[in-house]
Image: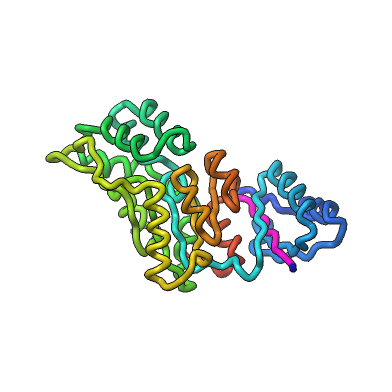
Amino acid sequence: MSLVLTLVSHPATMKIDEAVLSLISKILKRPIDVTWLNKGIACDIPVRQEENEQVQIIKAALYQQQIDTALQHPDKRRKKILIADMDSTMIEQECIDELADAIGIKDKVANITEQAMRGEIAFEPALRERVALLKGLPIKKISDVIEKRITLRSGGRELVQTMKANGGYTALVSGGFTSFTTHIANKLGFDENRANTLLKTGDKLSGEVKEPILGAMAKVEALEDIVAKKELTKEDVMAIGDGANDLDMIKLAGSGIAIHAKPKVAKEAQIALHHSDLTALLYLQGYKIEEFKT
């Protein structure tokens, strides 16, 4: 049975050239058939199952050239549901770290965030600890952080809008906060968003988060809930994230993808993207650039 090896580079670098294709042909010891999804940026190459050893050599070689790779069955790659993490996935920051920076304690909070995202400490108590450190933060600071500190990862709107235009359902499911997911979901066009709720006392944060906390298991439950409501299967889902609290969700999905992820997550995910932007998730599904929507 033939498989498809997809090559993707960041749109700003256009790394896939004739030298790269010649290297692949040399490793496979045969001519290759290239289908361009976006010239210089993404392409598909059919490979045989018995060429797995050579494919691993190709993947290692291209990683060094800042080119991401994914090996898939061609008939199972296009998905009907997108479930995406927010922090360091659809956006480039960790929202709680940016809130902490607003009151001068970013280093302390970011250290806890890093440990939680690496899976070194449990997510739920780590979130409670970090939120407690935000006690007394004026609510208006949240809007300031969204406006001045939060940036979208490139390709996110194209990802969401293209999947929706082709009948897909999109959900932003975050261990972060509804104060941010509502804004980001609206900006990118997600059909729904789920996250934790920061509690308030007057016009300031109380230092508490509404229970139960949306963590790793809640992300799995969200995936299962959406699949059931849409009368689809887990095979129909593309799930993406970067942290340890995303890993169970990523493993459950038909296409589970770690993007710019922590080492543990990248190692255990079906597909890991280290160099690309979010349009890579469309190329992995076989979409060509001319099919992208914004």
Magenta segment includes 8: yes
Q: Residue furthest right?
A: 29
Using residue 91 as the reference point, say whether residue 251 is left or right of it.
Answer: right
Decide: is 184 above or below 2: above
Residue 261 placement (x, y as % from top left): 53, 43
Q: Quadrant of residue 279?
A: bottom right
Locate residue 237 relative to residue 62 in the image: left or right: left
Quadrant that contains the N terminus: bottom right
What residue lies at 35% left-to-right and 45% top-to-bottom?
176
Residue range in magenta is: 2-10
Identify which residue is drawn at 53% across, 39% down: 262
- Image position of 99 (left or right of 15): left
The foreground one among 249 and 170 is 249
Residue 289, horizontal then vertical, whole percent: 59, 65
Q: Position of residue 203 (x, y in %)?
A: 15, 40
Q: Main secondary structure of the magenta part?
A: strand
In this view of the protein, can residue 11 be seen by the observer?
no
Residue shown at 41%/47% (left/top)? 216
Quadrant housing residue 207: top left
- Asked whether residue 40 is in view, the answer is yes
Residue 109, given in percent of the width and then of the height, sits at 36, 30
Residue 173 forms part of the magenta stretch: no
